[in-house]
Image: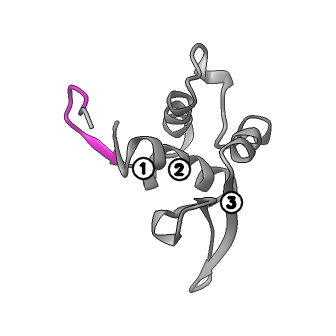
Amino acid sequence: MNVNQTGKLMKTAELEGGLLDNWVARAQGVKGVYMMYMPSTNWEHGGPIIERERISARPLSNDGVHQWGAVGETDDCERMQRGPTALIAAMRYLVAREFGEEVPC
């Protein structure tokens, strides 16, 4: 992975908000106004990606902490990405699948 000019990388599992949406846009080849594209919080944007990419999300509970896990249809749990919502977990999975476990921030 090419590192940006600052040399800093961020774990895909920690991406959220606009940064996560930006990486999803890159993975999907979306160009243009990213402020209107919010697949990690808007089901109208993220839902079709989940269907098209055949991503499965399910609730997880560990020691009383509720979160979501997401994987592709042919992946095992080792590739699972987690998040506080199904959309965030699924979009993190998509970015990790396309770009790896770390991306430039």
- Give amino acid for label 1: Thr
Q: Which residue is mark 1?
A: 12
Left or right: 15 in relation to 17: left
Residue 48: image x %, image y %? Answer: 76, 39
- Quarter holding residue 78: bottom left
Q: Nearer the viewer, mark 3 or mark 1?
A: 3
Outermost front residue: 74
Quarter placement of the N terminus: top left
| Disc 2 residue crowd, few under 14, some 14–19, many 20+, Cα 10 Å | many
User: What stretch of residues is rendered in magenta?
Assistant: 3-10
Mark 3 or 1, nearer chain start: 1
Question: What is the secondary structure assignment of the residue under circle 3?
Answer: strand
Q: Which colour assignment does the render follow? A: one colour
Identify the disc placed on residue 56: 3
Q: Tell me: residue 7, above or below residue 5.
A: below
The structure residue drawn at horizontal position 66% and vertical position 27%, both measured from the top left corner, is 37
Image point (76%, 43%), residue name: 47
Tell me if residue 53 comes above or below residue 69 in the rendering. Answer: above
Query: Decide: marks 2, 1 in contact (CB < 8 A)?
Result: yes
Residue holding disc 2:
92
Identity of the amino acid at label 2? Arg
Q: Nearer the viewer, mark 3 or mark 2?
A: 3
Q: CA distance from mark 3 to mark 2?
A: 12 Å
